[in-house]
Image (tube, helix red, strand yellow):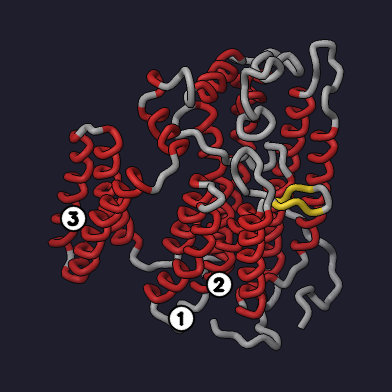
Amino acid sequence: MPLLKKKKRKLFVDWKILLPSLLISFIGITTLISTELSITKEIVDISIIQKQIIFFVVGIVVYILLSVLKLSYLKHWQIILPIYVLTIALLVVTLIWGPVINSVKRWIIVGGVQIQPAEIAKVTVILTTAAIFSMKEKYNQWILLLASLIFTIPIFILIYLQPSGSMSLLILMMWFTVAFTGLGNQLRNFLLLFIIASIASGMFLSSVTGNTLWLLVSFLGLIISILSFYARESWKVFVIISFILGCTLGLISNYAWDNILHDYQKDRIEAFISPEETQEDIGFNVAQSRIAIGSGQIFGKGFGNGTQSKRNFLPEHQTDFIFASFAEEFGLVGALVLLVLYGFLIVEIFLVSMKYFDNTFFSMLAVGVGFKILLELFINIGTNTGTIPATGIPLPLMSAGGSITVMTFFCLGLIQAIKNSSKEKITTGSFVDFS
């Protein structure tokens, strides 16, 4: 059964999705050109600009192709399973044969182009989790939660072994968010989540800092556990399990800090907690980023006039710290315009999820895409401003890179396909439908 619609029709494009994406991409390419201008206004390295324009064009083509996809077929195991297996295979190939770049194996090179399978894995986790929860009418939601976790764990482990702790953690957060929206009784779920997070984080931070005052956070979790336990009779078992799980995760995180985490990962966390003590070494990157952002003031230094990136004070100014490069040259006003564009795009994606809430697969897919972009935005800008530990997460549609650019447009194409597919009657075709 073909995935494309048989009936020929006009291509419908929602400009509320595509227009902000195009504007953000244009800003990203403009920033890249600016950072590559020398003092004499000559382009130092035009190749990175040319590559990004090519990735942008490929992304647009992918977006258009996906917009006419019969998206309802994606939830069937005949489609999802090959995608999942291919993702696992790419991650394994990366670990075995991937080149070592900056002491890590995160890319494979195909035709001279670096591909980062972890970016593909993000989308795979969203698709797999949404497809599994589309079977809610036939199977218990907790069984589906466990099944989706089982499918996510191999991806998490393979990415962590690259090593890429931040990306593996992002994978888990994306899985949890999509799965969380598929569960019923959200008030209870939020309370259970708070119990687990507060107890585990309090125990972890007290171990990292050596300050037992952080245990007060765990104590707050204990209080909420007691109140929730007596709130409703049906919650008691869930509260007990959540309390035990929070304590278990706290103990595991303490063990991981002492025996599993790499030194560079510990350094990033310590630099976040005590930046004044690490500004000379690991905190230097974030310090330079904050200087660049601050020096832009209200209206910025102007196109091509940034100093932090041109004098190589700002590391990774084309990828991880591109927001700082942009803010230095276009100031607070430019940064706010950029954030408004991102905000408009993300809100529109979440509105799609709400509009098609009666279709579990569509709704959860939109939630996953929206949260993916939101989380990447939060982490990247948080790193640039020093509000969260430094991580190597690029800014979608802004940072230079083929994988992040193409896969972001892939995700946006899925959102466009949801809008297009919902206009027609959804059929199961000749696939074996387990949902």
Residue in the picture at 65% in, 56% down: 94
Around disc 3, counting alpha carbons within 10 Å, would you say few (fewer than 14), some (14 to 19), or many (20 or more)?
many
Query: What percent of the width, then of the height, locates residue 348?
Result: 60, 50
Residue in the picture at 56% in, 43% down: 376
* Residue corresponding to mark 2: 131
- Image depth: mark 1 or mark 2 in front: 2
Amino acid type, callout 1: Glu
Specify which label sits upstream in the sequence, 3 or 2: 2
* Local secondary structure at mark 3: helix
* Residue corresponding to mark 3: 225
Specify which label sits upstream in the sequence, 1 or 2: 2
Say the numbered circle drawn on residue 229. none
Count of numbered marks:
3
Tell me the CA gap for discs 1 and 2: 12 Å
Asked whether 252 or 37 is in front, the reply is 252
Relative placement, left or right, of 221 versus 180 is left
Query: What percent of the width, then of the height, locates residue 52?
Result: 79, 40
Tell me the CA gap for discs 1 and 3: 30 Å
Relative placement, left or right, of 324 versus 198 is right
Amino acid type, callout 2: Ala
* Residue corresponding to mark 1: 137
Residue 189 in view (yes/no) = yes
Tags 3 and 2 touching, CB below 8 Å: no
* Local secondary structure at mark 2: helix
Tell me the CA gap for discs 3 and 2: 32 Å
